[in-house]
Image (cartoon, grey):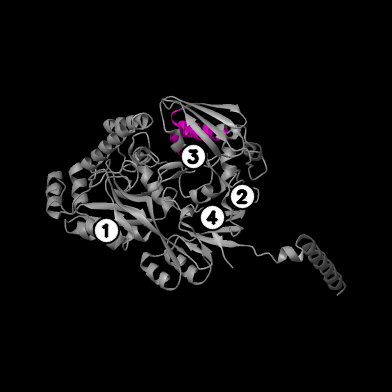
Amino acid sequence: MRRGVIAGALAAVIAAGALAAYFLLYPPSARREKVRTVVYAYPDKITGIDPSIEDDTGIVVIGVIYETLLRYDPIKNATISVLAESWESNEDGTVWIFKLRRDVVFHDGTPFNATAVKLSIERARDVYRETGRGCGYIWDAVEEVEVVDAYTVKIKLSYPQRLDLMAAASYSAYIFSPSALAKAGASSPFDPKLEEWFNSGNDAGSGPYYIEYYSPESEVRLRKFERWWGWKLVNNPDAPDVVVIKIRTDPLDQYNGLLAGEIDIASSVPRANVRDLAARGFKVINLTTFHNYILLLNVRRYPTSLKELRLALLHAIPWDELVSVALKGFGRLGSGILPHGFPGHVENLRYSYNLTLAREYLKKSGVEPGVTIEFVYQSDYEENEAFAQLLKSRLAELNITVVLKPMPWAAVKDAGKEVWTNPDAAPHLIISDWWPTMPSPYDYLYGLFHSDSVEWNWAGYSNPEFDELVSRAFELEGSDYAEAMRLYAEAQRILCEEGVAVNLWDDVRPFIVSGGVEVPEDALNPMYMYVIRFELVKVRG
């Protein structure tokens, strides 16, 4: 009894102290302020948030907390100032000078300067050169990054390049604070401790929001960075104070979350439910994106190792039905490899739906009827499942059995990369959805098909002629852009003729927004896809 009385009295004292502390920290005027919160539903688990190395779903986080020197505007086909106030190059495009903003601090209060730019570019470039990880190939031409003074950087290239486009890339172009090395206990920018520190939920960015809580499989919570240099420019007092990124991989879960008031912005509701949500008063923003779905055929495993068999499969796809059946109308039939409106896109570079021709190719291949094909795709993308069922039914008419293997994204990636280590265990068919790193055809064609690229080249494709075309085109972009585009088109025709891969469709992504939130058009960008510029979003009421 005595212990209970003492414990009760002690608890009362602690509670009173906590209450007093609350009133000191949060006086009535502050408590009356509403915390503006936006909950954004995202369809994939976060694969990483290292600003130099991440090349996948982590873009939804790093694109908000970090900044690049420039941003790409696909409507104007122009680069826009971010951390660089001005930039220029010499006549032949081999030397670039960037003048940097002076009023920028990183989230830990460290001043932004030219040293941070040099460190960030060199780390992304050299990690890629040494390990092939990340998208540091965007800095391939960079020979030297010179700190001229605290707010001037001179970059010397080994060949002419549109470095302004590289500086606006959606991966591996982010600038981070040098203070991250000491915090991570890293001996150098390439010490694995630094990557571990980033991917543990720490950030060293300068963007409008910083990480408050990080659980990559369930939720990421971002807090408004009051010292962000851009608040005076966007002049948005209604911007969210807190952004919650909810990982909701099931499209129906996103739909139900909207109806329950748990979600303010959804990126991946079932397409069949979009009209219903619009009728209920939700705003629908149909973003035409550079996100496309590419079917890759394993050229290293029988029977897709045979060109004639690959062409038979591709002519058995009912192209006229893809958008209506798989996408419920939210998309555009693909052509070539690159999306419509993207630099280097080639019109009318596609296959016809022709079962007679498919049977002819099948006969030429010498493959016996009844052959089995394995098809791997991401399980929680409804469009993939719809396409897979459609393809299975059509190939059955050719007496080809398709074994469908829907998998989580991480397993899809592992299965795709196996084409280089154990091609007979890798799937015959696999879908990779792709959004660009930079506004250049090189991003798609090198990343997905060059023999030096094994991270995403899930066809196992290796062709010296193709490699030379793509590499030469990239080197010409800074000096003869028209010729570079011609070479990129020729490279796509080679892929088409050999039946290596095909762009199934370009994604039109319906973003669904609740009534209390306003998402202006310039808060979304087809180049950066799932990244929302929350500093422009308005929270009402």
Q: Is mark 2 on a helix, strand or loop?
A: helix
Residue matched to label 1: 322
Q: Can you tell which of label 4 and label 1 is closer to the viewer?
A: 4
**Residue denoted by label 3:** 172
Indicate the position of residue 129 as horizontal and vertical percent values: 46, 31
State the image coordinates of residue 508 (x, y, percent, origin top left): 36, 57
The Cα–Cα distance between marks 1 and 3, rounded to whole angstroms, is 34 Å
Q: Which of marks 2 and 4 is in front?
A: 2
For marks 4 and 1 on the same chain, the one whose residue lies earlier in the sequence: 1
In percent of width and height, residue 12 lies at 83, 70
Labels 4 & 1 near each other (Cβ < 8 A): no
Look at the image and tell me whether residue 379 can be seen. Answer: no
Q: What residue type is labelled 1?
A: Leu
- Which of the two labelled residues, at mark 2 and mark 4, occupies the earlier sequence position? 2
Front in this rendered view, residue 29 or 442: 29
State the image coordinates of residue 125 (x, y, percent, origin top left): 48, 33
Pointer 2 or 1: first along the chain: 2
Residue identified by numbered label 4: 536
Q: Nearer the viewer, residue 214 or 70?
A: 70
Residue identifier under label 2: 232
N-terminal-most mark, 3 or 2: 3
Question: Could you tell me the amino acid type at mark 4?
Answer: Leu
Mark 3 falls on what kind of element? loop
Q: Nearer the viewer, mark 4 or mark 3?
A: 4
Q: Which span is picked out in magenta?
A: 119-141
- For label 1, the SS is helix
Crowding around mark 2 (Cα neighbors within 10 Å: few <14, some 14 to 19, many 20+) is few
Position of residue 112 relative to residue 354, above or below, is above
